[in-house]
């Protein structure tokens, strides 16, 4: 994932009171902390959650590494996600994300971003894990999230059969509303309009999670090699 928009602009767009020290991120990977917006009693708030959902009933938090995504078609019924879908939904602010396509013996990375480069929001679910059942309660509960996916639109289909659910801004309040009926929410879990996004090939730098700079998202013709030094 990519989120490099200045914190003040993310704050304005998503309507939360915090002004956090959000560092530009160009290569966010599963199991890493990510910003998320959720609704609390006094409105929206920005929090940091680990990417990879750990259900409240889990015995081992390592399950989160396998639950980075939740299929929208089954999210209301699958035990790992159904309680979070009913009660704990969030927005995941991003500037873009990556997908890979097999080309011969290698995989070519692609960046997917809005055509106007504006930030947008994934549909997310979050959970709070307090420790294994019958075990010691954690002093600081582990809070995690997963990203809901749907079938790919025409832009993504050449790369992958799935894509994250991108919520239109007009539906953000509905997604966060704790009283929203599940059937209505399921109606939001659809592919993004084809005209919203573009995909372009990037260099190999994005393939290494240790690299986290704007060169990761540079178009292939402009991208430095993976081992090139980056100047800040």
Image: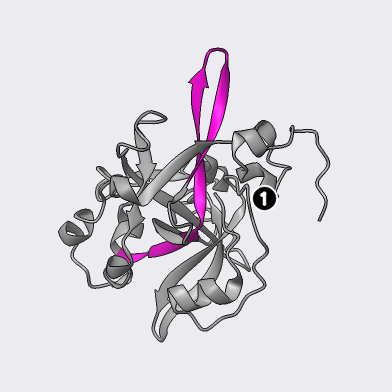
Asked whether 145 or 110 is in front, the reply is 110
Residue closest to the eye, 90 or 105: 105
- Quarter holding residue 151: top left
Residue behind mark 1: 214
**Element type where label 1 sits in the image:** helix
Residue displayed at 36% across by 38% down: 155
Q: Is residue 80 visible?
A: no
Is residue 177 placed above or below 65 in the rendered structure? below
Q: Residue furthest bottom?
A: 42
- Which residue is at 51% across, 18% downward? 103
Residue sitting nearer the eye, 159 or 66: 159
Quarter containing the C terminus: bottom right
Is residue 75 left or right of 130 when viewed as pictured? Answer: left
Determine whether 72 is above or below 48 in the image: above
In this picture, is 44 found above or below 220?
below
Residue 57 in percent (x, y) is at: 43, 53
Q: Main SS type for the magenta part?
A: strand
Q: How is the image coloured?
A: one colour
4 lies left or right of 43: right
Residue 154 in picture, x, y percent from top left: 30, 36
Region rendered in magenta: 87-112
Residue farthest to the top, as pictured: 104
Q: Is residue 176 above or below residue 40?
A: above
Q: Quadrant of residue 48?
A: bottom right
In the picture, measured across the screen, residue 220 lies left or right of residue 119, that is right
Residue 161 visible to an observer of this rendering: yes
Judged left or right of residue 44, residue 209 is: right
Q: Is residue 105 magenta?
A: yes
Q: Total number of numbered labels?
A: 1
Image location of residue 102, percent across then percent down: 50, 21
């Amino acid at each position: 994932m990519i989120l490099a928009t200045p914190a003040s602009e993310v704050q304005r767009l998503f309507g939360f009171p915090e002004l956090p020290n959000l560092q530009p991120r160009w290569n966010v990977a599963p199991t890493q902390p990510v910003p998320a917006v959720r609704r609390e009693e006094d409105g929206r708030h920005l929090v940091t959650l680990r990417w990879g959902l750990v259900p409240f009933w889990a015995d081992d938090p390592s399950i989160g590494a396998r639950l980075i995504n939740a299929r929208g078609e089954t999210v209301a019924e699958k035990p790992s996600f159904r309680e979070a879908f009913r009660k704990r939904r969030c927005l995941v602010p991003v500037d873009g994300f990556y997908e890979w396509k097999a080309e011969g013996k290698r995989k070519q990375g692609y960046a997917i971003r809005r055509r106007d480069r504006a930030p947008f929001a994934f549909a997310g679910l979050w959970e709070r894990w307090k420790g294994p059942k019958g075990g010691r309660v954690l002093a600081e509960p582990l809070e995690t999230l997963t990203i809901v996916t749907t079938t790919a639109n025409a832009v993504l289909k050449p790369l992958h059969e799935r894509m994250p659910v991108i919520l239109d801004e007009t539906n953000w309040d509905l997604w966060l509303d704790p009283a929203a009926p599940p059937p209505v929410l399921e109606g939001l879990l659809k592919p993004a309009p084809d005209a919203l996004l573009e995909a372009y090939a990037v260099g190999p730098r994005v393939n290494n999670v240790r690299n986290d700079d704007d060169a990761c998202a540079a178009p292939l013709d402009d991208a430095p090699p993976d081992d090139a030094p980056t100047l800040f």
